[in-house]
């Protein structure tokens, strides 16, 4: 790749469809075609990764919601809840429960 021509331009997509024999192209044109192919592959994979990232983030939010529901379900039967400073993550869950007594330990 270091010996590639100084041309930094890739073929236009419509021109790539017209190419039937790669070996009939000049060296510079082959490099331009190669760059076009690489651009197309990168775009394709970025779209796929973006879709998976969206699904993953959505699943993470759902998992968080389900864990909060489970915590609330567990706490519903309790009358007294003890909480340390590391228990801050349960603050919203405890507020929703509206229990009779909460013990906060620091």
Image (cartoon, rainbow, N blue to C red):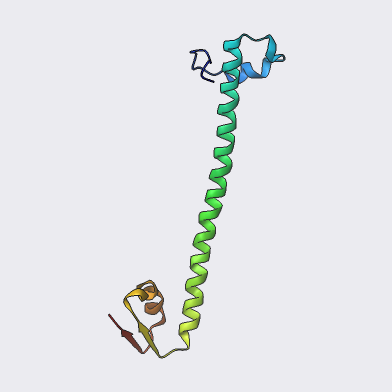
Q: Give the quarter of the figure containing the C terminus.
A: bottom left
Q: Is residue 47 above or below residue 87?
A: above
Q: Give the quarter of the figure containing the N terminus.
A: top right
Q: Is residue 8 above or below residue 87?
A: above
Q: Left or right: 88 with respect to 27?
A: left
Q: Left or right: 80 with respect to 41?
A: left
Measuring from the top left, give residue 80's x and y in whole percent: 38, 89
The quadrant in which residue 93 appears is bottom left
> Closest to the observer: 98 or 63?
63
Measuring from the top left, give residue 95's x and y in whole percent: 37, 78
- At 33% from the left and 79% from the top, the residue drawn is 84
Name, please, the residue furthest toward the front.
2
- At 50% from the left and 71% from the top, the residue drawn is 67
> Closest to the observer: 5 or 55?
5
- At 71% from the left and 14% from the top, the residue drawn is 21
- At 50% from the left and 74% from the top, the residue drawn is 69
Measuring from the top left, give residue 45's x and y in whole percent: 58, 38
> Closest to the observer: 51 or 23?
23
Measuring from the top left, give residue 42's x and y in whole percent: 56, 33
The quadrant in which residue 47 appears is top right
The quadrant in which residue 99 appears is bottom left
């Amino acid at each position: 790749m270091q010996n590639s021509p100084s041309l930094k331009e890739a073929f236009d997509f419509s021109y790539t469809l017209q190419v039937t024999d790669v070996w009939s192209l000049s060296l510079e044109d082959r490099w331009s075609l190669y760059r076009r192919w690489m651009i197309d592959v990168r775009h394709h994979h970025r779209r796929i990764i973006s879709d998976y990232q969206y699904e993953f983030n959505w699943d993470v939010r759902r998992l968080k919601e389900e864990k909060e529901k489970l915590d609330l379900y567990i706490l519903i039967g309790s009358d007294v809840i003890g909480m340390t400073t590391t228990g801050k993550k349960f603050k919203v869950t405890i507020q929703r429960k509206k229990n009779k007594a909460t013990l906060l330990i620091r």
